[in-house]
Image: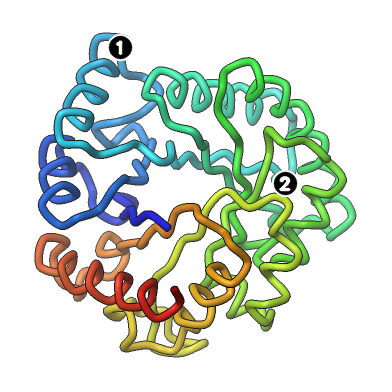
Amino acid sequence: MRLAFSTLGVPGMPIPEVARLASQNGFHGVELRAHSEEPVHPGLSLNERVEVVERLKAAGVEILTVAGYAKVAAPGDDEPVLTQIRALLELARDLGAPYVRVFPGGGDSGTAEADATAVRRLSAAASQASDLGARVLLETHDSHRTGEDAARVLNSVGSGSVGALWDVMHTWRGGEDPAETLRLLAPHLGYVQVKDIASVDDTTPLPPGEGVLPLAEVVELLSRAGWDGWLCWEYEKRWYPQVPELPAALPAVRDHLLRLLSAAA
């Protein structure tokens, strides 16, 4: 397995700094938050996109994901959501990123309605993803936080161009056993996002290994299944200002994840 970290919780971090931190701390890739307030977003010119690629390539760092905010199960018209996904897919193509992250976002819709909306939109996005050479990943999150929820949608879509991003915190807080999550998501799994938290009710981030999430079990299950994808650490200082700065946190994160991988080998 290879290691990445996310810039989701680091507002406005310049790409040269992202590249330096990843390279110096032994991370192979980065998950880039694609938002208009960030250095990387769909509004970048082609020259700006090329510069992002060159900066990270020079540091030997891969762009794992364009992490967007399209909500595929949200109520409303399909077209604005599909337009948003297409823009993210075009950005991923230009950056050489294999994945685009989307959210469910079903809100107050009932389960059947949210599922149907997500299936319809992801089925439409699948053809776009195939044409543009990236894969749309539905994160286990909000209205579809368990593997069961995500698999219910993805099994209906039935396309290799659409898959799952397993956020361990959300499936665990949803009461799902990691072995069951893996069983359900294995046919669709893009990569795995990890963090650690204080408790089921307190999602304040902690250094990996100091909280309650079953990270060792997850890594062991993945290893035993022969899965050789990406583990991506999600850093959330944006929403929890009390956590350590990213440069100070990365060495301990890397060491803990490497220990988990070594123990599971």
- Give percent across and percent down for residue 127: 72, 21
Q: Quadrant of residue 94?
A: top left
- Give percent across and percent down for residue 209: 33, 85
First in residue order: circle 2 vs circle 1: 1
| Tag of residue 257 | none
The residue sitting at 60% across, 61% down in the picture is 141
Q: Tag 1's secondary structure?
A: loop
- Give percent across and percent down for residue 199: 45, 90
Amino acid type of the residue that numbered disc 1 sits on in the rendered structure: Ser
Dividing the image into 4 quarters, which one contains the N terminus? bottom left
C-alpha distance separating marks 2 and 1 = 30 Å
Q: Tag 2's secondary structure?
A: loop
Amino acid type of the residue that numbered disc 2 sits on in the rendered structure: Ala
Crowding near the residue tagged with mark 1, few <14, some 14–19, many ≥20 C-alpha atoms within 10 Å: few
Q: Which residue is mark 1?
A: 45
Left or right: 133 with respect to 246? right
Q: Is residue 77 above or below residue 144?
A: above
Q: Quadrant of residue 51?
A: top left
